[in-house]
Image: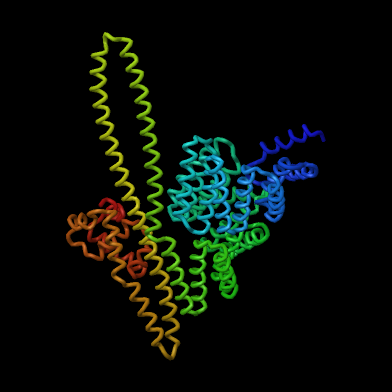
Amino acid sequence: MKVKNFVILVLCLLFTSPAIAQEDQAKVDSLQELLVNAKDTARLEILRLLFIEYIYVDYQKAKGYLEEERELLDKLDRPDLFARFKNEEGIYYSVISENETALATFEEAKGLYQTLGNQERVSALLNNMSNCQRRMGRYPEALELQMQSLKIKEELQVDMDKLCASYWNIGNITGDIGNYTESNVWYRKAEVYYDSAGLEYDLAQVRYNIGLNLEELDSLDQALPLFEQAMEYYEANNFYNSLAGGLDNIGEIYYKQGRYDKAQSFLERSLEISEVNGEKSLIGLTKRRLGLVYLEQGKLRQAETYIKDAIDIAQGTKTRKNMINDYKALAQVHQAQGRLNLALDEFMTYDSLKSVVWSEENMEKLNELEIKYQTEKKEKELALQEKQIAVLEKETATVRLQRFGLIAGILLLGLIFGALYYLQRQKIRRQIQEKEKLDAELEFKRKELTSFTLQLSHKNEILEDLKDKIKALKANAPDTRQYNRLINTIDINIKDDTNWENFKRRFEEVHKDFNKNIKMAYPKITSNELRLMALLKMNLSSKEIATLLNISQEGVKKARQRLRKKLALQPQMPLEDVVYSF
């Protein structure tokens, strides 16, 4: 092959290589054929393309190409190519779940690109670093890096597909902290563009993520079709990691629906694929979910083995979010085995880890970062408007000079209208800023209240279940003193008035004068009925209300009936409509 033709073919491959790795055998064969005679930078480019083709399909083959790249770079004085190599190396470590090493490698690449003055690549490295922090459960750090990346992209006025990558990742992080509705707002921004641009892979991926959020919102019937559509695309294109993840989530949906045999089938297939091609953290997630399926099927030994494997993987990959749920699952298994002391210890470990990851400080920091981004964006828009106004004023001044006879009148009118416009604009700006500040504070308090209430409900539910198991064991035990001490400890925790005082304080911050207005309208309302109405205002289910009030669901139903009677409601009028009106 002539040198000229060889160079042309390499350049064509460079500019037509897809952003997502696919095992297109014809392309791989062509690249490997070119590699035989290629040298120096031409060989380096072919090795990079082969790395891209294999990294998400067969990371071991990708590693071989990466190592050969490094050997070539040692002979070349090319800082730009070395910076690019460090990014590829970071991607490799990410795929094999060595997140700390990946983070350090991306940081090194970012420093190299900053020295080279390449801000677009700096933005890409910030995105990669954010993904590492996210996988390790460091959500405030992940969101801050993602916002920095988005800010650079907006300043550079990059293409829409690059902006959508940031929308996508911000959606990931807000979904991780439980803001599933807000997460889907970010995903939908990207979805609109991918659909209009005909980007099938990206569209499949972002709709898959929307399905994950719908699953968390218990909209399982809406989530399942999105997963199934994505599976067809992944399988047809050999996206093994994505396929394994999708099968895992379909298995989780069947688990939530109580269809344990189907859940087991999908999860086992996911595990089979991910153990060959997938990342370690996905293997751990699937093992935990399989363990929970076995728990429901009464296969307690298998359940314990799988969940302990999941904990080992989470500790190795430092994925704290997975570790939290792993300890919760192991507590459930040991509870079912009657090993209540172990179950209580593991529940306490779960609760402690969750408090660290989902602390109020972290939640506040996450919300502050997003508010900061929105504020800076509005300030830029206002600065642009001011610049446009300055241009218009300059043009107006030129016209005044050309038409001297009208200068006095135009100048006077311009000053008057300019002053009025400026004053009005300042007033509107202050009003907008005050409203945004109040809205942001209220939204944070609302999220804080929801998070606190659900954590309190979940804690009481687990403790009640533990208490029932202990009572069952106590009935057949010759010595009940130890069981009584455990039961008393659990009762004290459940009935702790401090929890209700904290709830009441947070509730009043979000729904000001709620209790006062109800008492004015219905003076005979009791404190217990006010508590029930507050929980209804939170849109909680009967099961969650029963757990929080430490009564049965039948007790909740009777309490609702008594409350309807006291409020003198007509049969066709929903109780919730009255509660929401306050």
Looking at the image, residue 297 sits to the left or right of residue 529; the answer is right
Work out whether residue 567 or residue 428 is closer to the camera in this orientation and state it.
428
Looking at the image, residue 347 sits to the left or right of residue 284; the answer is left
Image-quadrant location for residue 453:
bottom left
Q: Return the residue found at the far bottom.
A: 478
Residue 45, above or below 104: above
Residue for point 48% across, 42% down: 150
Image-quadrant location for residue 407:
top left
Question: Which quarter of the figure is the N terminus placed in?
Answer: top right
Residue for point 56% across, 57% down: 249
Looking at the image, residue 195 sits to the left or right of residue 499; the answer is right
Image coordinates of residue 344 in percent, x first then y, are 45, 76
Image coordinates of residue 416 in percent, x first then y, are 23, 22
Image coordinates of residue 169 in percent, x first then y, are 51, 48
Question: What is the image's colouring?
Answer: rainbow
Residue 317, above or below 222: below
Image coordinates of residue 410 in percent, x first then y, are 26, 15
Q: Return the residue found at the far top.
A: 405
The tally of labels here is: 0
Residue for point 45% across, 50% down: 144
| Residue 556 seen | yes
Residue 494, above or below 403: below
Work out whether residue 351 or residue 298 is closer to the camera in this orientation and state it.
351
| Residue 572 seen | no
Residue 230, above or below 417: below
